[in-house]
């Protein structure tokens, strides 16, 4: 075994050994003359801007950008470059994009520079935003002075024709790289710890190419290595100097735009394992190519801001990706027959005690690394535990643990490679690697709770005694909003009745239709005795019913300034629900509510592996249990802008179940108001309790820590027919089952106290209410 893979040892309990995979001396022999960590962070941001600039991808615009690059920019920067001294200037974005693409073909770029300018032209390493702004401003001044008749910006419209392109090779290169950002769009790729680990692996890859690539075919870089390689190439003078001793060798590496096959990927893996005795792929560093790419079950993207930091009751949700690799030592080959009863069990430290995924030890290959598990975990799970267990023979039920190892997220984050290796009984080697935790979409659900009065106190004898037996005025239907970890974040209250309850004298009565407002209060209940408490005082959002305009059945005015209009057509074959959002303030953004699961939430059968995933996890069968159809109750909130005409889905809500998932850029109160208002309107229009609004007691939930909502999600590659739990899939794949309370029994009407107002009051106020003449249930 190479010493490269065995350095940096430490000790853990239970007789297991542990070592950091970042301590490899060979990589220090490879020199890289640019700060790849800063370069990668800067260039990922640049690629994102390019990807979001739709105008940059029109062929006439690209053609004009190539002309400007070829005829104007390169002569200018050539004159400014003296020796190895690079001027602090940056061109406009269209030229910079062409320049970036050109440098990713180092041989072609060098030939171009030497044939035209008799020297290689480099790019300044500018990683600071202030320096970038200065360099762009300085370039503008030089440009205007040198080219007074040429605009600094590319002003060619998408419908205009550009001059003929003389550099067809460069045009082809730019067109092939138009989707380059999608390879590096994962939000964890901006994290410093990830980039440091990627740089280490890139240096190892260069070491491998330098020492052992002769006689090999084409090698395939993993995604993290590819990220570093692309950024290294984008600084031509540095790359030329660093690769001088490896000239010709890097031509054996598959370029970012090239297709690769399974044989090339396997050869790369084997060479890496032979050199370093470690798995080639790592979490966040997979080989992309060959078979159709599997759609990941988790959608996360870079969020520019989190607008929900204003709500102190909400805590962000952080998600990480984890892979576990297993390798058996060849010395146990002779013992293999005696170990058929042994298996490895994967568990989490916290949040999902029910998780137990077993794999037979005898199924793992000898002397090669195998990816045993691939999953997504919330940071609150703390880590994973691997148990080596023995079933003990056919006459014994259950199994007994022989030894276990634990991988804590904090330990992995402290490793410079984001990976650790441990041994079980000195014959089973296990490597666990993670991506840095990044902020994931928020998850909120509304659960039934007790009726409250106008002050926000629950209707209870306890409160009555505390108020010296003064009757509690008003009746509000209440819902408690819980996050993914079961924490109380908000209290939703819907006004239903007014007045008091006195024995034999008075009963609460329904309030007028226009007074049946919905309010959201920030915070958790203040409990005074057991489950009896008072709602928080701070109101952060309201929805008031207003007279709808023509062609709409219902309308709500939000405190956010938005107006929601709802139409329900019972005659249509589908749900018949239509919603429209209107804002008072002028904005460049258009907001639409689309019926069903759209965009990233939409299920697509792309490729055989995705189809296998759906079959293995019983998603199709579960959807038939939904009753009215797969999309019943789902709506997707999509925001359109001039820069993003295709639209961006920022929230998914199920108004029947009162469950929402939304990005940090979307306001939690706004999404909750949408969900509640749609449910209330549809219930009134259909005169049916479609969302269990009449339940007025907290139902029994799963115990915290048993299977916390979305705490663990399996990657399709780790799914199998034996793993059918819907709690290991995204919640919207089987929403009814995931959101079901452990107490499935509906409370009978007689169990509710008349003091609360009685069932007739809530049916009248929420379902069969007397509506104004303008509110027609159906057409």
Image (cartoon, rainbow, N blue to C red):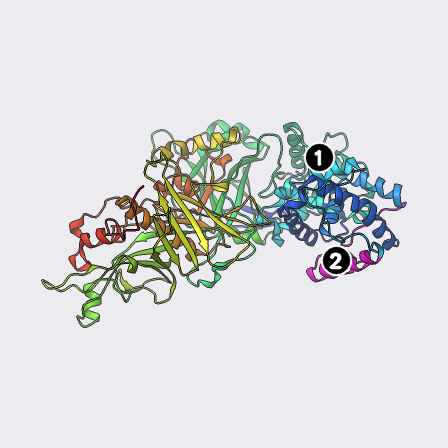
In the figure, residue 268 lies in which quadrant? top right
Q: Residue furthest right?
A: 118
Q: Nearer the viewer, residue 642 or 462?
A: 642
x and y, in percent, of residue 495 in the image: 28, 59
Check the picture and name the quadrant holding the N terminus.
top right
Q: Nearer the viewer, residue 667 or 731?
A: 667
In the figure, residue 370 lies in which quadrant? top right
x and y, in percent, of residue 460 in the image: 21, 63
Q: Is residue 642 above or below residue 141?
A: above
Give the residue at mark 1.
254
Q: Which residues are magenta?
A: 118-145
Q: Earlier in the sequence, mark 2 or mark 1?
A: 2
Secondary element at image label 1: loop
Type of secondary structure dominating the magenta stretch: helix
Asked if residue 125 is among those painted magenta in the image, a careful observer would answer yes
x and y, in percent, of residue 522 in the image: 38, 62
Please tell me the numbered disc located at residue 136: 2
């Amino acid at each position: 075994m190479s010493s490269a893979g065995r350095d940096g040892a430490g000790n853990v309990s239970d007789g297991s050994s542990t070592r950091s995979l970042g301590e490899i001396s060979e990589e220090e022999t490879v020199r890289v003359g640019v700060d790849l960590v800063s370069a990668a962070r800067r260039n990922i941001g640049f690629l994102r801007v390019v990807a979001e600039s739709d105008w940059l991808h029109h062929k006439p615009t690209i053609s004009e950008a190539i002309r400007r690059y070829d005829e104007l920019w390169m002569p200018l920067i050539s004159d400014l470059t003296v020796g190895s001294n690079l001027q602090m200037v940056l061109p406009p974005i269209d030229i910079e994009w062409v320049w970036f693409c050109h440098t990713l073909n180092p041989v072609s770029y060098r030939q171009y520079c030497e044939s035209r300018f008799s020297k290689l032209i480099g790019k300044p390493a500018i990683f600071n935003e202030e320096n970038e702004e200065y360099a762009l401003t300085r370039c503008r001044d030089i440009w205007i002075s040198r080219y007074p008749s040429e605009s600094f910006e590319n002003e060619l419209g998408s419908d205009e024709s550009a001059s003929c392109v003389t550099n067809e090779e460069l045009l082809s290169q730019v067109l092939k790289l138009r989707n380059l950002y999608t390879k590096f769009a994962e939000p964890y790729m901006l994290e410093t710890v990830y980039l440091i680990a990627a740089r280490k692996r890139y240096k190892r890859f260069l070491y491998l190419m330098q020492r052992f690539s002769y006689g090999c075919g084409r090698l395939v870089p993993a995604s993290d290595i590819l990220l570093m390689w692309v950024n290294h190439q984008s600084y031509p003078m540095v790359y030329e100097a660093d690769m001088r001793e490896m000239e010709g060798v890097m031509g054996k590496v598959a370029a970012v735009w090239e297709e690769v096959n399974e044989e090339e990927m396997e050869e790369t893996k084997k060479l890496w394992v032979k050199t370093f005795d470690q798995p080639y792929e790592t979490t966040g560093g997979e080989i992309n190519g060959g078979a159709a790419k599997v759609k990941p079950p988790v959608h996360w993207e870079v969020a520019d801001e989190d607008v929900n930091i204003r709500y102190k009751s909400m805590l962000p949700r952080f998600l990480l990706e984890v892979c576990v690799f297993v390798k058996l030592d060849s010395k146990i080959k002779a013992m293999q027959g005696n170990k058929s009863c042994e298996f490895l069990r994967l568990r989490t430290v916290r949040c999902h005690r029910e998780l137990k995924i077993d794999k037979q030890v005898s199924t793992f290959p000898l002397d090669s690394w195998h990816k045993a598990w691939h999953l997504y975990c919330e940071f609150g799970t703390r880590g994973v535990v691997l148990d080596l267990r023995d079933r003990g023979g056919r006459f014994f039920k259950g199994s007994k643990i022989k030894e276990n190892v634990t991988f804590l997220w904090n330990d992995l984050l402290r490793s410079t490679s984001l990976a650790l290796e441990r041994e079980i009984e000195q014959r089973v080697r296990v490597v666990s690697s993670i991506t840095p935790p990044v902020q994931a979409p928020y998850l909120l659900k509304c659960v039934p709770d007790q009726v409250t009065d106008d002050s926000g106190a629950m209707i209870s004898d306890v409160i009555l005694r505390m108020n010296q037996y003064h009757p509690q005025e008003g009746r509000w239907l209440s819902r408690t909003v819980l996050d993914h970890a079961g924490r109380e974040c908000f209290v939703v209250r819907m006004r239903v009745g007014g007045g008091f309850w006195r024995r034999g004298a008075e009963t609460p009565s329904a309030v007028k239709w226009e007074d049946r407002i919905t309010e959201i209060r920030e915070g958790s209940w203040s409990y005074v005795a057991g489950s009896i408490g008072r709602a928080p005082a701070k109101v952060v959002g309201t929805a008031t019913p207003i007279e709808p305009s023509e062609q709409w059945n219902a309308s709500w005015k939000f405190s956010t300034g938005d107006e929601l209009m709802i139409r329900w057509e019972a005659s249509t074959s589908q749900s018949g629900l239509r919603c429209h959002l209107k804002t008072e303030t002028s904005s460049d953004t258009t907001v639409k509510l689309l019926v069903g699961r759209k965009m990233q939430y939409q299920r697509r059968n792309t490729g055989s592996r995705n189809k296998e995933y759906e079959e293995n996890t019983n998603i199709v069968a579960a959807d038939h249990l939904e009753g009215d159809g797969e999309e019943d109750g789902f709506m997707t909130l999509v925001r359109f802008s001039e820069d993003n005409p295709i639209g961006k889905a920022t929230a998914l809500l199920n108004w029947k179940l009162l469950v929402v998932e939304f990005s940090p850029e979307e306001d939690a109160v706004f999404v909750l108001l949408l969900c509640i208002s749609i449910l209330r309107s549809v219930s009134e229009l259909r005169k049916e309790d479609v969302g269990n609004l009449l339940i007025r007691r907290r139902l029994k939930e799963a115990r915290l820590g048993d299977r916390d909502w979305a705490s663990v999600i399996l990657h399709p590659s780790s799914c199998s027919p034996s793993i059918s739990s819907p709690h290991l899939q995204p919640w919207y794949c089987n929403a009814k089952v995931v959101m079901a309370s452990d107490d499935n029994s509906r409370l009978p009407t007689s169990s509710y106290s008349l003091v609360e107002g009685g069932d007739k009051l809530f049916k009248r106020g929420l379902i069969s209410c007397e509506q104004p003449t303008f509110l027609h249930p159906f057409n």
